[in-house]
Image (cartoon, rainbow, N blue to C red):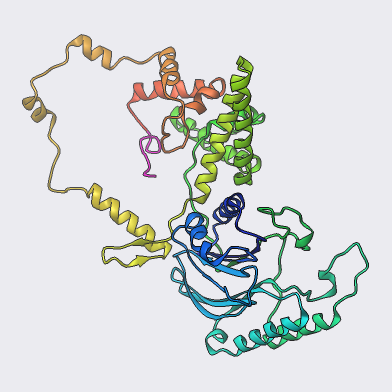
């Protein structure tokens, strides 16, 4: 499991809109633990704000007469355990334990004073923590606002500026004393130069990822109706459909072509619909504007615009919701909380096996003669001929087009909407495959299957 630790100088967390933006950012990045700096939230309001935006999460603060502006909050979800080592007006230091990996490390959230003299108390506190026997046994992460550059290149200004040589020397001395190294990073370098970075703050949030390489969650493919609205969609489907494939039955050829289209749709999704959270928010704003215009000035064109905007927002909203879905832990029969991924998978398999049962080797199916003895009904010759009649291409087409377009897909993930929207490309092969089944009575295993999701 990957742990994601954030730190953000939020510059006032009293605004509900800023709280919502921050909540969405944390959810989209799947953070486990983080620190807020300079919240400006009064102590008596902290619990209410946290309960509303981060229900179930735990928290701690460094409220004190010396810590004006409510300097540091830390929050964490229940998938990890936190032990607070030390709190001052300039830092909160804690130990982090991840039950899923059995790994431990220490993290210190820092909001240093603007005064160089006051910051010397911070450097002394860090040296004291470095000597702590608990902390020395584990990796140690420091992040936050030091209010002091480490090297000259960390500062940028259009105006003449005198480098704080003494401050730089003291910070470098502290990093040497505590045996610290600067982590490699990407993104905004001079974060204070970014205006309105997130939630109205003039700082960029900081995110650190800790742990082993994250195993990608295997999510079954599903065709979304919005794919068909992309201008490149027809060419993408036609190119994939006409790729050379292994020769076999018509149904086998159909499965091969659908597999090629599935891979092409995944590439289209990845290239055209990245940054899904912000795209969903933008699509929702567009939808609201179109709907407002529709109420004040209704017309057929605006109705069509509203339908298109609603479909786009619905698709992006579903994708954004799926991107936040995760199960951190489950309880087993002994009421022990399980975090390990492999054990979680086995718990789910065992649960459904218990519900669905296993094959009964004692019970045997009845023979045809036994069934005839139990049921005296017999089909007439006319009924028998209707049951075994081969459907015409027109009947297959009419059946496909009568299906609900967003009907739950089968194992391949394609809805009826895919076949309808691409009928001129996929229709002939699908018709031939259906007719082949009625002639041979053979259904491939990959077609005669389903998934639990």
- Which quarter of the image is occupied by the C terminus? top left
Q: Residue furthest left?
A: 373
Residue 68 placement, left or right of 170: left
Viewer-proximal residue among 154 and 12: 12
Q: Can you give x and y, in whole percent of width and height, for residue 13 in the image?
A: 61, 58
Residue visible at 10% across and 28% down in the picture? 369
Q: Can you give x and y, in whole percent of width and height, for residue 330 in the image?
A: 36, 60
**Is 109 located above or below residue 430 in the figure?**
below
Viewer-proximal residue among 423 and 100: 100
**Is 423 located above or below residue 183 in the figure?**
above
Residue visible at 51% across and 34% down in the picture? 258
Instruction: Quadrant for residue 147, please give it.
Output: bottom right
Residue 273 falls within the magenta-colored stretch: no
Q: Residue furthest right?
A: 160
Q: Main secondary structure of the magenta part?
A: loop
The magenta segment is 444-453
Residue 446 falls within the magenta-colored stretch: yes
Viewer-proximal residue among 428 and 151: 151
Residue visible at 78% across and 63% down in the picture? 190
Taking the image as drawn, is residue 245 in sight? no
**Is 345 located above or below residue 143 in the figure?**
above
Residue 414 placement, left or right of 291: left
**Is 246 located above or below residue 361 in the figure?**
above
Instruction: Quadrant for residue 107, please give it.
Output: bottom right
Viewer-proximal residue among 186 and 57: 57
Q: Can you give x and y, in whole percent of width and height, for residue 413 in the image?
A: 46, 37
């Amino acid at each position: 499991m990957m742990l994601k630790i954030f730190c953000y100088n939020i510059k006032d967390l009293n605004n509900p809109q800023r709280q919502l933006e921050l909540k969405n950012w944390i959810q989209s990045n799947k953070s486990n633990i983080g620190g807020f700096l300079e919240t400006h939230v009064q102590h008596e309001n902290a619990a209410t704000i946290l309960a509303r935006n981060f229900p179930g999460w735990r928290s701690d603060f460094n409220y004190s007469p010396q810590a004006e502006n409510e300097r540091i909050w830390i929050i964490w979800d229940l998938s990890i355990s936190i032990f607070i080592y030390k709190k001052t007006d300039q830092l909160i230091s804690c130990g982090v334990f991840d039950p899923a990996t059995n790994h431990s490390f220490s993290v210190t959230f820092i909001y240093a004073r603007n005064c160089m003299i006051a910051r010397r108390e911070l450097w002394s506190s860090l040296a004291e923590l470095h000597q702590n026997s608990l902390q020395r046994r584990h990796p140690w992460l420091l992040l936050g606002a030091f209010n002091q550059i480490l090297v000259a290149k960390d500062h940028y200004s259009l105006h003449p500026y005198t480098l704080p040589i003494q401050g730089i020397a003291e910070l470098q001395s502290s990093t040497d004393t505590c045996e610290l190294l600067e982590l490699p990073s990407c993104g905004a370098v001079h974060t204070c130069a970014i205006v309105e970075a997130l939630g109205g703050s003039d700082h960029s949030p900081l995110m650190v990822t800790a742990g082993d390489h994250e195993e990608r969650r295997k999510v079954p493919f599903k065709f979304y109706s919005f794919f068909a609205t992309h201008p490149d969609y027809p060419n993408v489907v036609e190119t994939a459909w006409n790729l050379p494939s292994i020769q076999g039955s018509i149904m086998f050829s159909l499965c091969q072509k659908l597999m090629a289209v599935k891979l092409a749709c995944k590439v289209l999704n990845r290239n055209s619909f990245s940054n899904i959270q912000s795209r969903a928010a933008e699509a929702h704003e567009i939808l609201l504007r179109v709907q407002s215009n529709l109420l004040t000035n209704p017309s057929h064109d605006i109705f069509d615009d509203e339908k298109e905007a609603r479909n786009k927002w619905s698709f992006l909203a579903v994708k954004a919701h799926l991107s936040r879905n995760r199960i951190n832990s489950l309880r087993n029969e002994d009421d022990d909380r399980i975090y390990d991924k492999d054990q979680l998978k086995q718990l789910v398999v065992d649960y459904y096996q218990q519900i669905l049962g296993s094959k009964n080797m004692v019970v045997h199916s009845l023979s045809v003669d036994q069934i005839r003895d139990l049921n005296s009904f017999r089909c007439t010759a006319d009924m028998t001929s209707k049951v075994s009649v081969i459907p015409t291409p027109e009947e297959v087409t009419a059946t496909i087009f009568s299906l609900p377009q967003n009907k739950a897909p089968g194992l391949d993930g394609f809805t009826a909407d895919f076949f309808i929207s691409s009928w001129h490309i996929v229709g002939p092969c699908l018709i031939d495959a259906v007719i082949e089944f009625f002639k041979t009575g053979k259904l491939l295993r990959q077609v005669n299957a389903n998934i639990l999701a």
